[in-house]
């Protein structure tokens, strides 16, 4: 990060910064290195002034200015290395060269530029060392090494002043980039985990909603149909009791049987719910994804234990026993349907007959089933209500048709309902033979 003022804000809060430094530690380090480099170059400037004939204060001032450039190493590492190369013939800037090459190699400067500047620094150091060492050897009459001595020592000096800082800078730069990449990856994974947790919570909420809707539909199918028949029989019992005690006894027995059947179905449903309630309640130690699995398992268990399509005849018989005129026709042979298809078909017929009891008392009703190659179709149609038949006064919540439509569409079927031209009402549904997966 590069700052242009005295204060800058970071992700963790507000920190004190100066220009291009992110931390005070960086300011102290670079200023300290700049002072050391300026002091070194100033001392070496004395010798430089003596060799060139310049006044000593000029050499010292030149050394101070050249060495202080090291303060800019983080912002302009290329400029620092160039100044270090330029001052190499003057015999100064060794600390600046070492630190400058390290900073250049560790920075994000393109590698081609780093290689070129490293080569220039190596060549400059080699030439200056070679020339000075050759002059020193020539001045010593009692020291006569071979021709290999000067170039070999110059090579070692050049490598020692360029290779270690560059290699160490490359290592530090690679390590820093790796750590930044790991931090970015960790932040990305944290965001992904947060998104996954949100989606898991949404799926869990969806599963709970679907389970509530399923329970509501099952309760409606069981209670509405059975209780409707019980109310119809109770009304008939009240009407015939004074005139025909034997028929009243039969009606009372039918009411008792239907009540027991309703209780049996409710107990089965509650048993399924209790089986999965420990997971559906979602305690803290249970993963969110298991909620949807528990809901699906409870729904599957309820489907396995639900009614079957062949029980439609019994359903029609119960309506006939309640005084309704019902005709049942079945086309084709029933293959082995999945449990959810049979249960949905049964519930559609059941709810349609319940609606006839509620809204069209005394109306003649036709129930038709058709088993086809890839689908099963059902239709329940009633004629106009018999005005001579007393209304049982059954309440209606208006959710019967909605529940039937949800069931059929949930399996990928087609559902149509509406009044007929004759003044009655028709409910039609077509389900795929293999359910939604087909």
Image: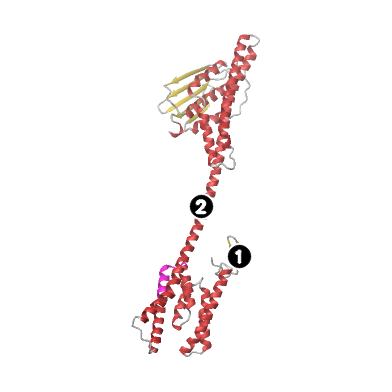
In this rendering, position of residue 236 left or right of residue 146: right
Classed neighbour count for the residue bearing mark 2: other residues with Cα under 10 Å, few (<14), some (14–19), many (≥20): few
Between disc 1 and disc 2, whose residue precedes? 1
Measuring from the top left, give residue 1's x and y in whole percent: 53, 65
Q: Nearer the viewer, residue 327 or 194?
A: 194
Q: Report the colour scheme.
A: secondary structure
Crowd band around label 1 with a 10 angstrom C-alpha radius: few (<14), some (14–19), many (20+):
some
Give residue 135's position: percent from left, percent from top. Answer: 39, 87
Return the mark for residue 189.
Answer: 2
The x and y percentages for residue 83 are 47, 78
**What span is colored magenta in the figure?**
107-119
Residue matched to label 1: 15
Asked whether residue 324 is drawn in magenta, I would say no
Q: Position of residue 320 (x, y in %)?
A: 54, 16
Secondary structure at badge 1 equals strand
For the question of whether residue 244 can be seen, the reply is no
Q: Is residue 41 above or below residue 333?
A: below
Q: Residue at x 44, y 78 (%)?
A: 85
Q: Mark on residue 212?
A: none
Looking at the picture, tell me which residue is in the foreground, 89 or 221: 89
Specify the quadrant of the image occupied by residue 155: bottom left
Q: Does residue 321 appear in this view?
A: yes
Please say if 226 is above or below 296: above
- Foreground of the two, 154 or 272: 154
Q: For this rendering, which residue is in front, 147 or 11?
A: 147
Taking the magenta stretch, the answer to whether it contains residue 108 is yes
126 vs 95, left or right, is: left
Looking at the image, do the residues carrying marks 1 and 2 touch, with CB atoms under 8 Å apart?
A: no
Q: Secondary structure at mark 2?
A: helix
Compared with residue 248, is residue 73 higher up or lower down, i.e. above or below?
A: below
């Amino acid at each position: 990060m590069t700052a242009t003022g005295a204060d800058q804000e970071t992700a963790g809060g507000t920190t004190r910064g100066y220009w291009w430094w992110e931390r005070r530690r960086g300011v102290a380090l670079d200023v300290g290195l700049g002072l050391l480099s300026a002091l070194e170059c100033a001392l070496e400037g004395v010798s430089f002034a003596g060799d060139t004939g310049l006044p000593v204060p000029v050499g010292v001032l030149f050394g101070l200015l050249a060495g202080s450039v090291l303060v800019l190493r983080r912002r302009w590492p290329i400029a620092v290395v160039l100044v270090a190369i330029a001052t190499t013939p003057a015999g100064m800037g060794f600390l600046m060269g070492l630190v400058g090459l390290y900073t250049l190699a560790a920075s994000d400067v393109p590698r081609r530029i780093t290689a070129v500047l490293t080569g220039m620094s190596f060549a400059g150091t080699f030439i200056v060392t070679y020339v000075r060492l050759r002059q020193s050897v020539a001045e010593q009459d009692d020291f006569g090494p071979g021709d290999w001595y000067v170039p070999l020592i110059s090579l070692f000096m050049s490598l020692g002043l360029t290779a270690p800082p560059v290699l160490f800078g490359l290592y530090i730069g690679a390590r820093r980039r790796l750590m930044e990449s790991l931090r970015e990856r960790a932040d990305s994974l944290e965001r992904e985990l947060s998104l996954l947790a949100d989606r898991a919570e949404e799926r869990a909420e969806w599963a709970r909603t679907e389970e509530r809707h399923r329970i509501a539909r099952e309760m409606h199918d069981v209670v509405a149909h059975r209780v409707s028949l019980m109310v119809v029989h109770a009304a008939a019992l009240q009407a015939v009791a004074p005139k025909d005690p034997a028929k009243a006894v039969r009606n009372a027995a039918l009411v008792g049987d239907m009540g027991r059947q309703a209780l049996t179905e409710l107990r089965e449903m509650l048993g399924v719910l209790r089986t999965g309630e420990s997971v559906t309640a979602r305690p803290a130690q249970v993963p969110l994804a298991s909620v949807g699995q528990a809901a699906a398992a409870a729904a599957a268990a309820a489907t396995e234990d639900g009614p079957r399509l062949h029980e439609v005849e019994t359903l029609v018989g119960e309506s006939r026993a309640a005084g309704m005129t019902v005709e049942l026709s079945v086309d084709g042979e029933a293959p082995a349907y999945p449990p959810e298809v049979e249960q949905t078909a049964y519930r559609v017929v059941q709810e349609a007959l319940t609606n006839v009891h509620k809204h069209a008392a005394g109306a003649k009703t036709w129930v038709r089933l058709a088993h086809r190659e890839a689908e099963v179709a059902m239709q329940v149609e009633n004629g106009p209500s018999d005005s001579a038949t007393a209304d049982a006064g059954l309440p209606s919540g208006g959710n019967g048709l909605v529940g039937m439509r949800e069931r059929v569409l949930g399996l990928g079927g087609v559902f149509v309902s509406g009044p007929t031209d004759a003044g009655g009402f028709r409910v039609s549904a077509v389900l795929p033979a293999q359910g939604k997966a087909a």
